DNA sequence: TCCGTTGGTGTACAGATGTACAGGTCTGGT
DNA sequence: ACCAGACCTGTACATCTGTACACCAACGGA
């Protein structure tokens, strides 16, 4: 196998002028990454292939290998994209959170959102999270992901509580995605409330 | 490793069948399943192949397909085996638990055990757990696994608390396996203590 | 206008993989 | 002793895979 050489200069030397020349589809790279996420959601990481991604993105096979030298590159970008999208979503959630509201209730709501309407995204994130276990480049992203989660929650309480909340949050997600029946909202809420010390 | 025969002209060369075959080996099926667990621990689910399992188990390729018609069969058995081994381990842990001891402390100890000495097993279990997401046959096993966990913990408290403890427990495991640094024992213990209502 | 450069694509190919299956070996019953 | 059937293994093969790379298309400077 070839060594993934993503950081060093590829066949494109640093042009001195404006790089806008001939860039006909700048979003394509991101579209492919998102298509990869879609494929993982549908068939799982272990069945992710260049061809399936190409089909899902509606681009020729050559495009996927053009933008991503190796399958691992594609996986890395997919996880980054998923993590970014997720953190973005969390920020919006946090922004809309009532300052004086009940945090436990809001967290329970969030859990149920991730297990209900956003279940597909949740499944993908966990797949990629687990896939990171054998890919050092991905571990970094995964760590940052749940560090961001802990810090977000810590903003409403303190560092230790924030961390504990993020752990419990991930736990609910993990146990939730293998069951078709959602957990009881009251149970979820109660568990968060206990962590918050009532 | 089998020697590749690239000089094939005849469809069936008269092999002399030197190896002793027909030797009964009732444990072989289980050995192969455990070898599959080993392979998953080393290379991840997405790279699990009949050949790697055969090599790890020290059996010919034909054996793996003889005992497990398809790769999914092998995965199912591997998850079952891992779950059984894990529940067995938990029972031993529970049996050795001091009746009047501090549950939060014991749980923290257990978490650190799973992230330290038993890290490889933990990683495998999570991989298989996630692999179950696209395999209905496996979902059942995964569900039973964390149901057993919740019930075990419930034995020391109540149903709702047991469930919450199992969720937090899974959460600590999940966040722990992507980091090389173990969480602080005090933090883990404190989180369990809060769930237990002090 | 023309042509070099860069972005993008179709196709080929070597290798790996799942799986079938013919054939060898041994056990147990008679 | 003998044989039928269960147990086990080596090998073949169609298929799928990642990836390389020759080729085409558009843009922009001259």
Image (spheres, coloured by chain):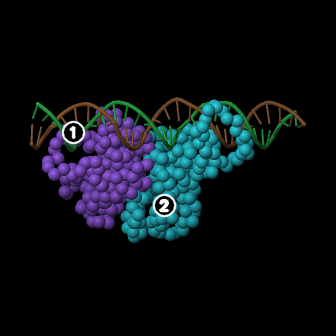
Chain colours: A purple, B cyan, C green, D brown
Chain under label 2? B
Residue A26 image position (x, y, % from top left): 21, 42
Using the image, determine if residue B111 lies above or below residue C19. below
Q: How packed is label 2: few (under 14 Cα within 10 Å), some, or many (20 or more)?
A: some
Q: Is residue B166 visible?
A: yes
Q: Which quadrant of the structure image shows residue C29?
A: top right
Q: Residue at x 60, y 40 (%)?
A: B5
Report the front residue among B162 and B3.
B3
Residue C28 in which image quadrant = top right
Q: Position of residue B132 (x, y in %)?
A: 47, 44
Question: Does residue B13 lie above or below B38 as drawn?
Answer: above
Left or right, A185 with reference to C27: left
Instruction: Please state which of residues B192 and B18 is positioned toward the viewer in this rendering.
Output: B18
Question: With B51 as the anchor, is C30 left or right in this view?
Answer: right
- Relative to A8, say whether B24 is above or below: above
Residue name at image x 28 percent, y 58 percent: A148
Residue in the image at 41% along x and 64% along y: B180
Q: Distance from label 1 to label 2 (Cα)?
A: 45 Å
For label 1, the SS is: loop
Q: Which residue, given by chain and number where applicable, does mark 2 sit on?
A: B119
Q: Decide which of B192, B180 is in the foreground and name it.
A: B180
**Residue A80 at what x, y percent from top left?**
30, 50
The residue at the point 46 percent across, 52 percent down is B126
Residue B49, which numbered label? none
Q: Which of marks 1 and 2 is in front?
A: 1
In the rendered image, is residue A56 in sight?
no
- Asked whether the residues under the numbered discs 1 and 2 touch, taking CB atoms below 8 Å apart as contact, a structural biologist would say no
**Where residue A82 appears, x then y in whole percent?**
30, 48
Residue A25, label in figure: 1
**Structural crowding at the residue carrying mark 1, measured as other residues with C-alpha within 10 Å and reported as few (<14), some (14–19) or many (≥20):** few
Q: Quadrant of residue B160?
A: bottom left
Say which element carries label 2: helix
């Amino acid at each position: 196998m070839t060594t993934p050489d993503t950081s060093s200069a590829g066949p494109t030397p640093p042009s001195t002028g404006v790089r806008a020349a001939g860039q006909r589809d700048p979003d394509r790279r991101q579209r492919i990454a998102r298509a990869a996420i879609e494929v993982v959601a549908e068939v799982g990481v272990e069945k992710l292939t260049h061809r399936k991604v190409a089909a899902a993105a509606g681009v020729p096979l050559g495009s996927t290998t053009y933008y991503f030298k190796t399958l691992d590159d594609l996986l890395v970008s997919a996880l980054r994209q998923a993590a970014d999208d997720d953190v973005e979503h969390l920020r919006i959630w946090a922004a809309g959170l009532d300052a004086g509201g009940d945090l436990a209730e809001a967290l329970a709501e969030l859990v149920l959102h991730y297990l209900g309407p956003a279940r597909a995204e949740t499944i993908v994130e966990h797949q990629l999270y687990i896939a990171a276990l054998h890919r050092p480049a991905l571990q970094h992203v995964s760590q940052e992901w749940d560090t961001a989660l802990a810090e977000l929650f810590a903003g409403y309480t303190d560092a230790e509580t924030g961390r504990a909340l993020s752990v419990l949050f991930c736990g609910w997600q993990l146990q939730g995605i293998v069951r078709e029946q959602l957990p009881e909202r009251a149970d979820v809420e109660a568990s968060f409330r206990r962590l918050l010390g009532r």
